[in-house]
Amino acid sequence: MTRRKNPFPGVRKNVVKGRIYWRFEAGGTRCNIPGPYGSPAFLTAYEAALAGLKLPRSTAAVDTVGWLIEQYLGSLRYKNLSDSRKRSIRGELDWLRDQAGDLPFKRLEVRHVEALMAKKTGPVAQNTVKKNLSMLFNFAAKKLGYIGPNPAKFAERMKTNPDGYHTWTDEEVDRFLARHPAGSKARLVLLLALNTGMSRQDLCRVGWPHVAVKSGKARIAYKRAKTSVAADLPIVPELAEELAALPKDRLLFITQDARPVGYKPETLGNWFRDRCREAGVPGSLHGLRKAGATRLADAGASNWEIASYLAHKDTKQADTYTKKANRPKLADSGFAKLSSMSNPSAALDKEGGKGA
């Protein structure tokens, strides 16, 4: 008789006091796999174990929102996110677990989703609740065998500002620079963000190791934390002046005042907003990133040139900047065509000049 091949290599049955447990042992990973054998929960845990992950020990009842969140956090899908995205979505899901962790997710309806959304302030935060719940239901359908509806998909999406974060104007940049003189940390942060397009988490990590001279020109190169896309940019004169004042043995360009250590992205963002209030401008670090892309678009940069500045994998976002920059030019071109048209000849006037 041919022995049946184990469909789950590394898994063995373990019987303790008459109860059956499933044990995974392979590649240095040792953990229990929840049953029943071959169930969606079993498959999710097995997939994680193969990748060297251990699902967190569940403290939530099965099929609750809290349990579903735990399954997601132990999945390969979560593991493959960037570190910055892991931090942000973990915070969002922790809030969701606090609000609805004990609720059975299979019994959630559209009205329940919208009630959770209403607990947040602002349309962006409310839409994030909708997005995360929809993601969890899709995960349950693909990985946990859930066959019910996705109520978050049909929840009402809140209307948001289509332009998102405020984009700095040239006047606001000048006002900020007038308030924060040369050699100040605030000025350095603004010029770094504006001239490199770095996000908060990238600004927190950049330093002299990222600067090099190539073909006689100083450049700054880094890999964006969120997308892992590499950027290699020239250092413009106004930024070069600020960097020249920094010690050459300084690992990080931006450090805290009390001690020479870096910032957390959120802390740097809050610190910079305080400097904006001092200068009387409604700005943010992300708004400077948008301002830099807008400057490039207004100067005639191509979509890929803007995408290189933003460290994006494609030109989808860059398209929005070039389209906005091109509108005035296209309007001028259109009206120029109108002005080149001659007035109709009197001979073609059907009224023949009558009634004049």
Image (cartoon, helix red, strand yellow):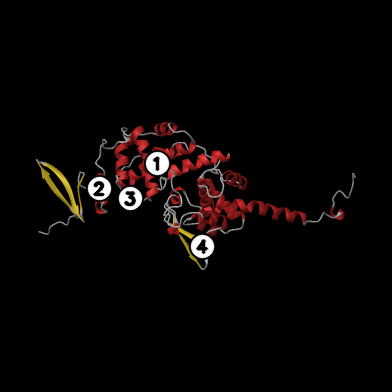
Question: First in sequence: mark 4 or mark 2?
Answer: 2
**Separation of marks 1 and 2 at Cα, in angstroms:** 23 Å
User: Helix, strand or loop at disc 1?
Assistant: helix
Question: First in sequence: mark 1 or mark 2?
Answer: 2
Q: Which mark is residue 314?
A: none
Q: In which quarter of the image is the N terminus?
A: bottom left
Q: In this view, does 250 lie to the left or right of 26?
A: right
Q: Residue 79 carries which label?
A: 3
**Separation of marks 2 and 3 at Cα, in angstroms:** 11 Å
**Separation of marks 4 and 3 at Cα, in angstroms:** 36 Å
Graded by Cα atoms within 10 Å as few (under 14), some (14 to 19) or many (20 or more), the crowding at tag 3 reads some
Q: Residue 218 carries which label?
A: 4
Identify the residue at image location x=10%, y=43%.
16
User: x and y percent of residue 220 in the render?
Assistant: 48, 59
User: Helix, strand or loop at disc 4?
Assistant: strand
Q: Is residue 279 left or right of residue 125?
A: right
Residue at the extreme bottom of the image, as rendered: 215
For mark 1, what is the residue?
132
For mark 2, what is the residue?
54
What's the residue type where badge 1 is placed? Asn
